[in-house]
Image (cartoon, rainbow, N blue to C red):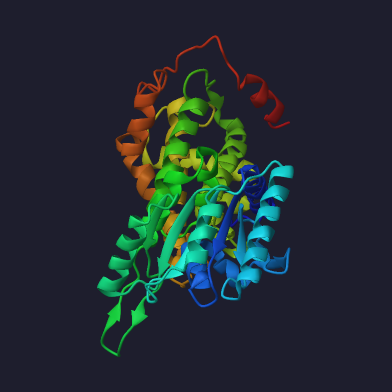
């Protein structure tokens, strides 16, 4: 009999994802440039959510606006009026300085400045040189040469580098494909270079926020999520893990939901309810936590009979790690597909998400102990043994009280 939909897990995952995003140290970026240099195009292609269009743009001074959006741990400061006369340019500089001081009062900082110049103009004014030198005293500056077409753009980059300005780097960028004719176009380039330069100059505690916000390098998100998930599983199911009775498989679910929430925060994807229903439904979670916990562990027995877990028996650290690894890595693969689709302006429907999640999850469960990720997790823990029939007794049992609190009445 099909279980009725239970949205409690969906709501809990959504809530915990929001909590995880809120834990990320926020990032502040100033984007400077004259009107028409392509700042909006740069922002919308470098970062997810098309922030210029969908974010909340709040003017904080006459020539400076603050762009932010719920769920994105980053604030952009966008300048206006640099193309006007020198008196206005001086005013813009004063407003930026004031905004930076306000950040400091809130224990925040300006983390990086993108100074945008149009490469097609091959020109930088004396006023702009002075302005860049002034800005460099406040935060690292990366000069972004937008609309970089052909050899003149490369030569302009080399010229700026000869000025020996106090900047971090100069990057040629074509943020989106440039169509020359019906048959010829210049493909977008340079955003990956800008991304690398940004990571290099940003403080370590801002990397998580920047990775969450960027949409250029999905593989970077994948690697960050996998690395974190493996460490989580080693510490959770390795040393000190107390084998859990099969009847208490429910206690694994809060850990797994917390893991999925953290992975979602790393990717920075805003999953709607129908997509989450598809993902959780693919692993049997639409019937509630108790049903999900038992279903996940039962799947291990179905694909790997004799793994050492049976009704009335105990779930060892290896078994818990195997099922949780299959869940985490399948989820990461699905999020990577969704993120790639979104970055390309596409969308994956919930039925396709559910199908892909189930296929990837089942495939990893079938691999069992031979799954490369499981092998790496085992290799990193001196207490996860493939001898799953006789789990070791351990003095330190941090989950004992947790199991008792969550055991079914």
Question: Which one is nearer the viewer's eye here, 91 or 370?
Answer: 91
Examine the rendered structure and indicate whether residue 248 appears above or below residue 346. above
Residue beneath the point at 48% across and 68% down = 42
- Percent across and percent down for residue 363 are 35, 49
Residue 271 placed where, x, y %?
58, 60
The image quadrant of residue 401 is top right
Tell me which corner region of the image, top left, top right, bottom left or bottom right, holds residue 365: top left
Residue 199 shows up from this direction: yes
The x, y position of residue 214, in whole percent, is 48, 57
Q: Is there any visible trace of residue 359 in the rendered image?
A: no
Name the residue located 59 percent from the left edge and 32 percent from the top edge. 247
Residue at position x 31%, y 86% in the image? 180
Q: Is residue 210 left or right of residue 183?
A: right
- Whole-percent x, y for residue 192 in the image: 37, 58
Q: Nearer the viewer, residue 249 or 326?
A: 326
Quarter of the image containing the C terminus? top right
Counting every numbered tag in the picture gives 0
**Placement of the N terminus among the 4 image quadrants:** bottom right
Looking at the image, is 62 positioned above or below residue 104?
below
Out of 85 and 214, give the one closest to the viewer: 85
**Residue sticking out furthest to the bottom:** 182
277 is higher (above) or lower (below) than 86: above
Horizontal relation, residue 202 to residue 158: left or right: right
């Amino acid at each position: 009999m099909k279980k009725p939909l239970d949205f409690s897990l969906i709501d809990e995952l959504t809530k915990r994802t929001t909590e995880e995003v809120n834990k990320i140290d926020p990032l502040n970026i100033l984007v400077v440039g004259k009107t028409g240099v392509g700042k909006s195009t740069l922002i919308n292609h470098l970062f997810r959510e098309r922030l210029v269009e969908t974010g909340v743009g709040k003017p904080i001074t006459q020539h400076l606006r603050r762009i932010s959006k719920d769920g994105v741990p980053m604030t952009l400061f966008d300048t206006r009026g640099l193309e006007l006369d020198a008196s206005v340019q001086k005013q813009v500089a004063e407003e930026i300085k004031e905004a930076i001081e306000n950040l400091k009062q809130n224990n925040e900082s300006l983390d990086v400045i993108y100074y945008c110049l149009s490469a097609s103009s091959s020109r930088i004014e004396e006023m702009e040189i002075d302005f860049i030198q002034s800005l460099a005293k406040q935060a690292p500056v990366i000069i972004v040469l937008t609309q970089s077409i052909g050899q003149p753009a490369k030569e302009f980059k080399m010229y700026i580098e000869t000025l020996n300005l106090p900047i971090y780097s100069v990057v040629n960028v074509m943020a989106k494909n440039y169509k020359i004719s019906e048959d010829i176009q210049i493909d977008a380039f340079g955003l990956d270079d800008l991304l690398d330069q940004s990571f290099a100059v940003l403080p370590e505690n801002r990397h998580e926020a920047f990775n969450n916000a960027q949409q250029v390098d999905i593989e970077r998100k994948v690697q960050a999520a996998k690395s974190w998930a493996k460490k989580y599983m080693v510490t959770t199911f390795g040393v000190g893990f107390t084998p859990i009775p099969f009847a208490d498989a429910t206690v694994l679910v809060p850990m797994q939901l917390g893991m999925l929430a953290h992975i979602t925060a790393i990717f920075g994807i805003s999953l709607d309810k129908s997509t989450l229903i598809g993902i959780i439904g693919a692993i049997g979670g639409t019937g509630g936590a108790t049903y999900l916990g038992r279903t996940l562990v039962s799947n291990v027995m179905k694909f790997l009979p004799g793994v050492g877990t049976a009704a009335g028996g105990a779930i060892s650290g290896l078994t818990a790690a195997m099922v949780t690894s299959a869940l985490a890595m399948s989820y990461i693969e699905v999020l990577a597909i969704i993120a790639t689709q979104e970055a390309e302006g596409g969308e994956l429907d919930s039925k396709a998400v559910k199908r892909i999640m189930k296929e990837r999850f089942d495939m990893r469960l079938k691999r069992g102990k031979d799954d490369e990720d499981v092998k790496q997790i085992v290799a990193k823990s001196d207490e996860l043994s493939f001898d799953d029939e006789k789990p070791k007794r351990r003095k330190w049992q941090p989950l004992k009280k947790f199991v008792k609190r969550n055991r079914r009445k």
